């Protein structure tokens, strides 16, 4: 059985990739007080995790620090899983904890992508640039909107 992570557990949770789907699911679960440990496209640290069938257990962080071939093998697994429609959950021991990386959501449908781009984005550079010239923005500012 997987450990349950709730708001008050003190666990950090990372959303990776584009977060449109996981942020909605996380919000829903938080409001309902439901566990967060199996939300797709998230990663977290756990004290212990029992692998289940289909999980990929990588070489530990400490092993990779000592052996670059083990790190390369881990990298291969991560790259392969990140490009699958039905990816596996990835586990890696780090010290006395385990990093758990849940598989990603499938790509957005055309309708979901259109909805996302219909949101009221400013399409302006981040305010931290305070009037500085940004060559990349100069190139695209009059492109598709």
Image: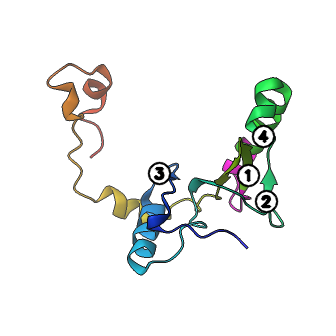
Q: Secondary structure at mark 4?
A: loop
Asked where in the image residue 53 lies, by quadrant, the reply is bottom right
Q: Residue at x 50, y 77 (%)?
A: 34
Q: Which residues are magenta?
A: 79-89
Question: In the shown orientation, is residue 80 left or right of residue 7?
Answer: right
Q: Residue at x 51, y 51 (%)?
A: 14
In the image, farthest residue toward the bottom: 32
Q: Which residue is mark 4?
A: 60
Nearer mark to the viewer, of 1 and 2: 1
Q: Nearer the viewer, residue 118 or 22?
A: 22
Q: Nearer the viewer, residue 108 or 12?
A: 12
Label ID, residue 55: 2
Q: Earlier in the sequence, mark 2 or mark 4?
A: 2
The answer to whether residue 115 is above or below residue 83 is below
Image coords of residue 117 (percent x, y): 33, 56
Q: Earlier in the sequence, mark 1 or mark 4?
A: 4
Q: Which residue is mark 3?
A: 18
For the residues labelled 1 and 4, the Cα–Cα distance comes to: 9 Å
């Amino acid at each position: 059985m997987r450990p349950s992570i709730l708001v008050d557990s003190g666990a950090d949770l990372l959303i990776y990739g584009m977060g449109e789907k996981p942020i909605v699911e996380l919000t829903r679960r938080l409001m309902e007080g439901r566990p967060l440990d199996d939300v797709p496209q998230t990663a977290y640290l756990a004290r212990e995790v029992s692998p289940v069938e289909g999980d990929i257990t990588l070489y530990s962080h400490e092993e990779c620090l000592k052996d670059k071939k083990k790190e390369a093998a881990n990298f291969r697994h991560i790259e392969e899983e990140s490009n699958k429609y039905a990816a596996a959950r990835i586990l890696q021991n780090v010290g006395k904890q385990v990093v758990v990386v849940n598989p990603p959501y499938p790509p957005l449908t055309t309708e979901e992508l259109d909805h996302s781009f219909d949101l009221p984005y400013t399409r302006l550079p981040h305010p931290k640039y305070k009037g500085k010239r940004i060559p990349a923005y100069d190139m695209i500012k009059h492109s598709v909107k």
